[in-house]
Image (cartoon, grey):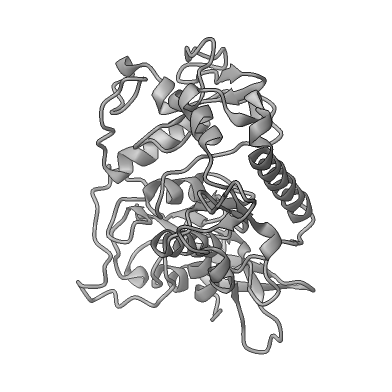
Amino acid sequence: DLDIYGPSLPVLIHPDDPTVRRSELGSGMVKPIEHKGVKILSLGFVSPKSGVPGSGPDGGAAVMRGPMAGRVVTQLLKGTDWGDLDVLVLDLPPGTGDVQLTICQDLQLSGAVSVTTPSKLAVTDARKGIEMFTSLGVPTLAAVENMAYFECEGGGKHYPFGKGILDSLPELGLQRSRIFQLPISSGTNTANDSGSPLCLSRPKEASLELDVFSDLAGAVSTELLVLEHGITSGADDDQDLFVSVSFDNESEPFDVASTNLSVDNRKGTFTVRLFSDSGALQIEITGEELRRIHPKTGKELDLNDDNSGIHAEPAHTQGGCGSGASGMIEHHRHQDAKKSKLFPVKIDKKGRYGYSVEWADGATIIYSMLSICKAAGGR
């Protein structure tokens, strides 16, 4: 449960033993709670003595800035001894903010499931979320619409809030078979309030809801399986599931998310490797070429322009994805690359988002995959 601003697991389920215990793996590591064979963790289960705002079952408001939120999310994920898992499901807060960016930088996400309601406003937000994950190289596997309709005693199906998600299929870029509509259901609400999820209590009157959950699980597991082999079945034929770039003298587009970056400190160059459906492309770029592009958008920077949106941060600052004006820069001072010593550098892959480059002059910059592709001449 990574909705650190409003952790919901302590309300939705009531484990027999909700205590978070230390792991034998070392200091700072904890064991997840296990409930009915499923490993779980939420800030709502963490002791309020931890000092983290909002922790504990009766914790107050989780008031924290972006960098701190990023650190809490990282601790919940990487400070937990999860052991062997089939799938790790992350419940994220609404929106496209610091938590989502931290996740995409720290983990190699397999896919996303969008959850919305039928209103036009909610579907618009869902579309933005899908676009964000697509831009970060994370495919959307399915979309769920809560409170989509209800069935009256006469057997008719009614849509009191409209058919928002069905009317927006072209914008979402998903096949109809990957849209799952849950009805307005007193059974689901009762299960949520009682702390006994439908998948455990399985009341006969909730057979429709359980069928939808089963179909959703089957679709997501199918997508995860086929994605391991580089294909997908859930995207609309007219929609690009991944962001791509093209190059002069190349007839086909290259997938941005699969971009690979390596460095040769002896030569002072980077090698960018890109992949398409039928081949690959390798391009060598200099440190100056990478240094003079915006780390998020890939646009060329005017390093003499104080309004470029890139500002100096103290060298000791360890901001997360929310630090710096661009939201992607931990700490650096954009100097004229030609007048500074750039190599040797250290690089570190940040999930599907991009690479962190620690330059010899003290700058540490997180470059998106898109910016790396553009530094190599992609468009």
> From where the camera sits, is residue 355 visible?
yes
Is 41 placed above or below 143 here?
above
Q: Nearer the viewer, residue 330 or 213?
A: 213
Residue 139, position as x, y percentages in the image? 61, 59
Q: Which corner quadrant of the image does residue 178 belong to?
A: bottom right
Residue located 70% across and 82% down the image: 252
In the picture shown, does residue 363 fall above or below 170? Answer: above
- Residue at the spot x=63%, y=72% of the render? 240
Residue 345 visible to the viewer = no
Q: Give the number of marks.
A: 0
Q: Residue at x 55, y 21 (%)?
A: 32
Give x and y (percent) for residue 134: 55, 63
Which residue lies most toward the left here?
A: 306
- Seen as rendered, the residue at the extreme bottom is 249
Seen from the viewer's position, the closer of residues 41 and 179 is 179
Q: Is residue 248 left or right of residue 130?
A: right
In this rendering, the answer to whether 171 lies above or below 12 is: below
Position of 360 with respect to 312 (left or right) is: right
Describe residue 249's horizontal placement relative to residue 72 as left or right: right
* Residue 345 picture location, percent across and down: 48, 54
Name the quadrant of the C terminus. Answer: bottom right
On the rendered structure, is 279 left or right of 363?
A: right
Residue 336 is drawn in which quadrant? bottom left
Please tell me which residue lies in front, 223 or 356: 223
Name the residue at 36% across, 69% down: 337
| For residue 193, above or below residue 225 | above
Q: Where residue 42 appears, x then y in whole percent?
A: 46, 27
